[in-house]
Amino acid sequence: MFGHIYVEDKARDHAMTRRILDRFSDSTVIGIRHFKDVFNRPGQDVLIQGKDRSLILAVNDGKKIFEASPVCQDMGLGDFFYAESAMNCIFSCDYCFLKGMYGTSNVVIFVNSDDYLAECAQRLDKGPMYLCASFNTDLGALNGICEWQSIWEDFAASHTELTLELRSKSVIHDTRTEDNIIYAFTLSPEKIIKEFEKGTPSLDKRIESVNRALAKGSSVRLCFDPLIYIKDFELCYNEFADKVIRDIDIIRVRDISIGSFRISSEYIAALRRACPDSSAVLYPFEKENGFCVYPSGIRSRLIGTLEKRFVEEGFGSKLYVMR
Ligand code: SF4
């Protein structure tokens, strides 16, 4: 992983940079003036780069915490923000909006963590906040490369007015038990994982992570989002619900989110160029309020398949559904 690591001049002397470079002592390190010179270079081929990603270490001297889009579920937790601690992901889900948004497969890790925590603390002075720290990336997947996940965990542990969500498709070995740190595990049917979620752990591995976190007493969220419309989706998602209900002690789960695939209309063309053979993105979506979505009939059948199962099992009060 990461044959080439680009290091911004400003990032060179940061402690996180040194720790990451120590972990990748075989990589070729190239100094750059600004991360955008590499990350935003025109004409990059997401498909080819995905086979040999580069890592970029940079300092974010702009905004670090952003208000979340209305198509993101706030899970009833109020003022909803996300932090851009890294950009892009080492996994390669066909439907990922990052492919449409960034036009590159290279990954940026911002190394000035203290500045992020200061901006977050400043925002918390105005009142409680719900912060998704694993948003334009999968921080769980970057564990072992950088320590962002534990930085956010430590910060949340000492700032109880912050509700932190760490969303991941990765295998998570260690979780914390503070109530305000939510580990959000995205689960999908194995058929969907194999076809559309390239490089991600199997459903069994993800369920093991969920159960490990639950056994430890951590706050766990299950995310069935995005649901993907495929042939025989009812059978596929019903079998998936059988497995989830059988293998996970749902009563101990904090909440469950359900949503079908949606993406900003701005990104769909680039996403299709990045995944030209993927039925997940080639579907003739409808446009609604600036987003590409499935037609409403398909959306409600997709969502309804899982929703019905969890309501029947008595978990209706844990459900947050994005319709
Ligand atoms: S795991 Fe999430 S962030 Fe990473 S490629 Fe898949 S959808 Fe995108």
Image: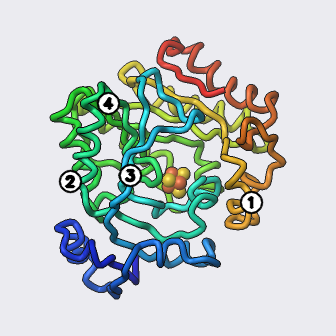
Q: Percent from the top left, x then y, of residue 217?
A: 25, 28
- What is the CA distance from the residue labelled 3 to the residue labelled 2? 13 Å
Count all numbered tags in the image, as a single digit.
Answer: 4
Question: Element type at marker 2?
Answer: helix
Q: Which residue is mark 1?
A: 269
Residue 138: x and y in percent read 42, 53
Residue 174, image quadrant? top left
> Mark 4 and mark 1: span between their CA atoms?
35 Å
Measure how far apart labels 4 and 3 are at the Cα level.
20 Å
Give how far apart the Cα atoms at labels 1 and 3 are.
27 Å
Residue plotted at (41% across, 66% down): 108
Characterize the local packing of mark 1: few (<14), some (14-19) or many (20 or more) Cα atoms within 10 angstroms.
few
- Residue type marked 4: Thr
Which disc is residue 114 wearing?
2
- Please tell me which of labels 4 and 3 falls first in the chain: 3
Residue at x-position 72% and y-position 41%: 290
Q: Badge 3 local density, few (<14 within 10 Å), some, or many (20+)?
A: few
Label 2 CB, ligand 1: below 8 Å?
no
Q: Amino acid at mark 1?
A: Ala
Q: Amino acid at mark 3?
A: Lys
Colouring mode (rainbow / by chain / secondary structure / one colour): rainbow
Looking at the picture, tell me which residue is in the foreground, 264 or 232: 264
Q: Which residue is tagged 3?
A: 63
Q: Nearer the viewer, mark 2 or mark 1?
A: 2
Determine whether the beta carbon of the residue marked 4 sits less than 8 angstroms from the nearest atom of ligand 1: no
Horizontal and vertical percent for residue 91? 50, 61
Q: Say which mark, if any, is on residue 163.
A: 4
